[in-house]
Amino acid sequence: LAKTTQPISMDSYEGQEVNITCSHNNIATNDYITWYQQFPSQGPRFIIQGYKTKVTNEVASLFIPADRKSSTLSLPRVSLSDTAVYYCLVGDKYSGAGSYQLTFGKGTKLSVIP
Amino acid sequence: EAGVTQFPSHSVIEKGQTVTLRCDPISGHDNLYWYRRVMGKEIKFLLHFVKESKQDESGMPNNRFLAERTGGTYSTLKVQPAELEDSGVYFCASSPPSGSGGANVLTFGAGSRLTVL
């Protein structure tokens, strides 16, 4: 499984754009890059997933360079409610008929400041 | 659409007792997963059901843990007898059937916190 490295924590003021970069040097050809968000006392919540280039949805954008050895989650104009832990996951273990065994790291704790 | 529901939200038991956690996945989601985070550690995979069948139980820590999904709907995770190191948060997640798109996007429940004294 590809190992991921991301910042332990980040602080940002409200209204700013936040970019969280994740390194995954050993990403495999078939691996997708997925980001989850987790609030206290809740389960992780899917944010965005991509394979290459750029993906955008109503919540965030995901930038993936050509070599795919890193990815950047971009949150536009964060608010206090975006304070959470953000996980970058790469290379779900796929076994046989399909077992997406997610491998969570420590994640990045984002604190949004008023 | 109802999300993934877990019960109880918190359970406090003594060492040696038995606890059963329940998970109701999103309707139509064939895939059901159990994960857990023990104190200070990262979230770890426990097992995966496809309908009522165990697809992958490589993450189950030992035989004190028993997961079932009779009828392919809700699932239970029983810990018997519970030990101190079992304390943590147990998450259930579900996803649509493989091949339907989105099978690798898991929807998690809020978790069941287990405290073993």
Image (spheres, coloured by chain):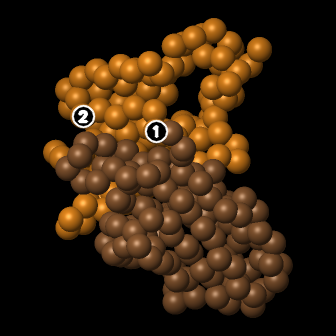
Chain colours: A orange, B brown
Q: Please tell me whether residue B93 is drawn above or below residue A34 in the rendered image.
A: below
Report the front residue among A87 and B79.
B79
Which residue carries the number 1 mark?
A46
Q: Which mark is residue B44?
A: none
Amino acid beneath label 2:
Tyr
Residue under disc 2 on the same chain as residue under disc 1: yes
Q: Is residue B62 above or below residue B51?
A: below
| Residue at x-position 77% and y-position 14% | A114
A96 vs B54, left or right, is: left
Residue placed farthest to the left in the image? A29
Give the residue at mark 2: A51
Determine whether, in the image, residue B104 is placed left or right of residue B89: left
Amino acid type of the residue tagged 1 in the rendering: Phe
Residue A67 percent coordinates (x, y): 21, 31
Identity of the residue drawn at 64% across and 88% down: B80
The answer to whether one can see residue A70 in this image is no
Residue B26's x, y, as percent?
47, 51
Residue drawn at (60%, 68%) of the image? B22
SS category of the residue bearing label 2: loop
Q: Is residue A97 visible?
A: yes
B18 versus A98 height, above or below: below
Does label 2 or label 1 sit earlier along the sequence?
A: 1
Q: Where on the picture, by quarter, is residue B78? A: bottom right
Rendered-image quadrant of the C terminus of chain B: bottom right
Neighbor class of circle 2 (other Cα within 10 Å; few <14, some 14-19, many 20+) is: many
